[in-house]
Amino acid sequence: MPSLFDPLQLGALTLPNRIVMAPLTRTRAGRSHIANALMAEHYAQRASAGLLIAEATMVAADGCAFTGEPGIFDDACTAGWRGVTAAVHAAGGRIQLQIWHPGRSAHSSLNGGVQPISSGERAVQGLINTPDGKQPYETPRRLRDDELPGIVDLFRRATRRALQAGFDGVQLHGAHGYLLDQFLRDGVNDRNGPGHERYGGAIENRARLLLECMDAAIAEAGADRVGLRLSTLAGSNDLRDSDPEALLSHVAQQLSRRRIAYLELRHMDPALISERRIAAVARQQFQGPCCATAASARPARKRHWMKAVPTPSCSAARSSPIRTWCSACAWAPS
């Protein structure tokens, strides 16, 4: 039986072990959003893992939701990340970049007065940290259908820049109530009428933007260097869906046809029956490496772990878990 320390093929990458570090927002890039020496040290220290997935990284200069998250939207950002990837590779590691747009989870005070954007006009219920303290989330501007090719291009250019920066691939962030998820789930996507009909309503339409962004990333990097994070059940950023299993089934089938490197399914509590049913849908509909990531609260820390979900085309991952850990935690927690 393979162990946690046996190799694993994940798309184009051969991992020397089955320990994967999940993308974890560190907000160490400052107001410039440029990756720096501290971040290079952080990731290089963890390079002996099978794979590192770097934190949520802005595809747009006006897509800031946390003060200090990194970007990949211009030459300066790309150059900053080169120092990180060089340090990781020098230490023998592999690293991918999670590319991300927050959508309505942003705030104008973090983005030079630019109103947040989304599939609809429903604001997140809650407060966001801003330079002026906690403030209510703002009502987002509903994107028109003719604006969405521009969003796709943001992910295309971010993928290109990630490769130029030396990353071994990208993971698109389609989870946690951020922009791509805001189009996927009908808890906020209520699009209809002229100028809004192609990306709203039926599941096939709501999944259109995500799949177009995936295709753009695949065109730049190749399917075997592109992954995706989804969370059709998680209620992060005040988002729900009326039929998460049907939504995941459609998306997983489409991703399987594209033969992407892996699908990561983000759980809040994998012990719940609903979470197990969602995992079963992923296993049935996605024929590549399918991973589940969860978090559990512990005194003074949060633990992250990932385990491979058995899939017909991922025999190497069937009997041994892939796990992820938070930077403050021990390797491969049980």
Image (cartoon, grey):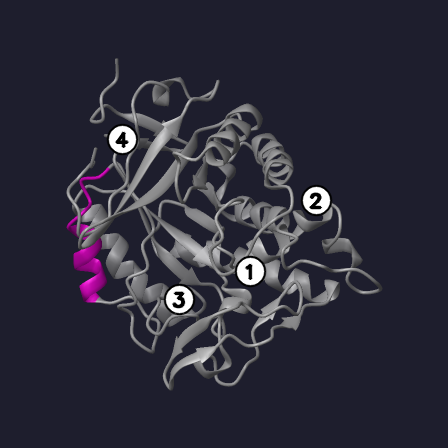
Q: Which x, y percent locates residue 205?
A: 73, 48
Q: Nearest to the eye among marks 1 and 4: give it.
A: 1
Gap between marks 4 and 3 measured at Cα: 28 Å
Estimate how packed mark 4 is, as few (under 14), some (14 to 19) or many (20 or more) residues with alpha carbons within 10 Å.
many
The kind of secondary structure element at disc 3 is loop
Image quadrant of residue 261?
Answer: top left
Asked if the stretch drawn in magenta spans residue 174, the answer is no
Gap between marks 1 and 4 measured at Cα: 30 Å
Q: Mark 2 belongs to which amino acid? A: Ile
Gap between marks 2 and 4 measured at Cα: 34 Å
Q: Write down the residue under mark 1.
A: 179
Estimate how packed mark 3 is, as few (under 14), some (14 to 19) or many (20 or more) residues with alpha carbons within 10 Å.
many
Asked if the stretch drawn in magenta spans residue 46, the answer is yes
Q: Earlier in the sequence, mark 2 or mark 3?
A: 3
Gap between marks 2 and 3 measured at Cα: 30 Å
Q: Mark 4 belongs to which amino acid? A: Arg
Tell me, yes or no, whether the two marked residues, 2 and 4, touch with CB atoms within 8 Å. Answer: no
Q: Write down the residue under mark 2.
A: 203
Q: Earlier in the sequence, mark 2 or mark 4?
A: 4
Q: Is residue 69 left or right of residue 83?
A: right
The kind of secondary structure element at disc 2 is helix
Mark identifier at residue 71: 3
Position of the C terminus, as image quadrant, is top left
